[in-house]
Image: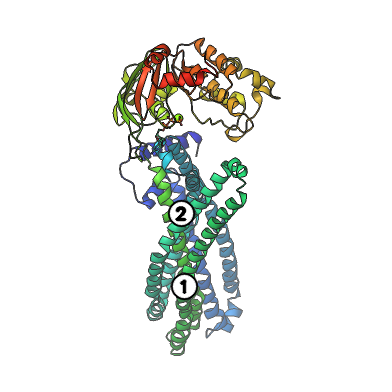
Amino acid sequence: MNVAKEQRIEAELRKEAQESTKRPGRIAWLWMNMKGVRGIYIIAIFGTVVYNAMQLVVPHFSQKIVDEFLTGENAADNLVNHKDVFINLLIAMVALTIIRVVVVYCDCMTYEYVSQKVLYRVRNILFDKIQRQDMKFYNTYRTGDLMTRVTGDLDAVRHMLAWVIRMIVEAVVLVGSVSIYFFYMDWRLALSLLAVAPFILGIIVLFKNRVAPQHRLLREKLANMNTIAQENISGNRVVKAFAREDYEIAKFDKSNADYRDTNIQTAFTWLRYYPYIESFANLLGLILLVMGGAFLIAGEITMGQYVAFSGLTWAIANPMRQLGNIMNEFQRFAAASAKVMDIYYAKADIMDKEDAIDHPGRFKGKVEFKNVSFQYEDGNLPVLKHISFTAMPGQTIAIMGETGCGKTSLIHLIPRFYEPTEGEVLVDDINVADLHLKELRGSIGLATQDVLLYSDTIDGNIAYGDGNITREEVVRFARYSAADEFIARMPEGYETIVGERGVGLSGGQKQRISLARALAVKPSILILDDTTSAVDLETEKQIQHSLKELDFECTKIIIAQRISTTKDADNIIILKNGEIAEQGTHEELIGKGGYYAELVKLQMGSEVA
Ligand code: GTP
Ligand code: MG
């Protein structure tokens, strides 16, 4: 399949996943995702039918050989007079076996091809989905759990296509065609052999009821183990700092053992039913021996027919034995696909409205909060209460207040990471909820409180928001954020690769790169959440100065603890328990003698004149 076609199908499926209001059944969902490879898959199923049918023809030939050349009345004559027929039959048997091997080979390849195609496609769609989710989603799902969904769970889905369905087809074809053949030879013997089938099916149903919850549990345990591993690896510095290696090892060991035990339990569930299945499967041989023997002695069936019967009982017995395995794998698929579909059909609450307003070109950068209140969905108290203020284009607004008073929550409403529970947030007099997220967020430069850098070069990190900017520009923004100097001093300069999450850089260095990254999109609105807290006062002064000299107009909303950062702001907002306690300029607030004036007094001695 060519790339363009694959992309078109993927886009269609994404659209479906986005818009559908009803989740289909898991098999229907699988079928839907097989778009474009369904034809090949049906050919593969046909191939399975063919090679299994071929398997049954061999005993038919052996029956002929036995009856006509070995034990029949004229066997000796036939062997002499019709030697050519005898040899032809032998050649046909060998040829059939070879052809069968080729068909099986091609068939397996086809199943594998289709299943890999679907795996690739669904994984892409899942990643796309995960990317487009809102903050709430990331607060809900643990990283390890998400990783399990796009790896292990998805592989169980692939296994369904590549193996489980093939086994089901195989079982149906074998049992079906052998039954027909048996009935054709002698219906009474056929009926006595097939009498065991209902018992086996009954056992399988009992088994299924028992094993289905086991597989759901197993899957949870795996996700749990992955989460522990992932959190431990990304938090390894904390582990080391507290010398908690042994504790972490014990924690992982426990979860690993838990997973192993659940695995063993699941396997033992099958073992509890297996003896019954095995007994019934072996009963077939006994029935054949007793009934078939009696029929043979009574002359109701020929020796050749007896050989055919006995040569084919495996074709009923084996699928019966295999049923437990198939059911096991099917339940694994059931548990995993439910998890995959959760993400596949996840809907972000925060997305573009259908009639979102187009805003081509640059925003002026006016930001207005109109009586905004906000509460986290999982929280039980409002975090922001009746917040109103306006930042005119180009102005600088500072937000201060003690820790936990709601500063970060407030600025997260501007790029619409969350939706206010009351009131509205406007950018250029348009409610942010009415704007296209891409346009809104594209015009905001945000340096978050905890800096996250990618394992990439420093250049790549700064240019993250706009891949097209030149090295000169990257350097210019690094200068604005007082980062150029230390970057230039690094052995490979802008080409230095920073480790995962920026390992290898100091806190203040990371903050400055994050500031340069926010500036590099030339935003209309620049939001800095405690971005210079780890930077020394001298460097901070330098940054303050450059922020005033930016060569593009930009409204700045700055969260800070230091008076030195905020004193020149056009408006300083003091938040207290989610409410605006005071606001005004430096002088006005000092005049008021409130929290800000206290802060000035406190910090005076050390830094502010
Ligand atoms: P500092 O960064 O420490 O200066 O605090 P802040 O003013 O930025 O506080 P922030 O806006 O992060 O948090 C305000 C309140 O909201 C706090 O009481 C937090 O516990 C709470 N909060 C923050 N994030 C979440 C969240 O994702 N879910 C819930 N339920 N509460 C949250
Ligand atoms: Mg904060």
Number of the label disc, if any, that sits on residue 414 = none
The kind of secondary structure element at disc 2 is: helix
Which quadrant of the figure has residue 134? top left
> Which percent across, then down, holds residue 606?
55, 19
Mark 1 lies within 8 Å of ligand 1 (Cβ measured): no
Q: Residue at x 41, y 81 (%)?
A: 189
Q: Amino acid at mark 1?
A: Arg
Which residue position holds label 1?
Answer: 272
Q: Nearer the viewer, residue 418 or 49?
A: 418
Q: Determine the secondary structure under disc 1.
A: helix
Vertical placement of residue 519 versus 106, above or below? above
Looking at the image, which residue sits at the far bottom?
298
Q: How far across and down, in percent of the image, does residue 398 sit?
A: 43, 19
Q: Which residue is mark 2?
A: 220
* Residue in the foreground of this view, choosing between 173 and 507: 507
How far across and how far down the image is residue 226, in percent? 53, 49
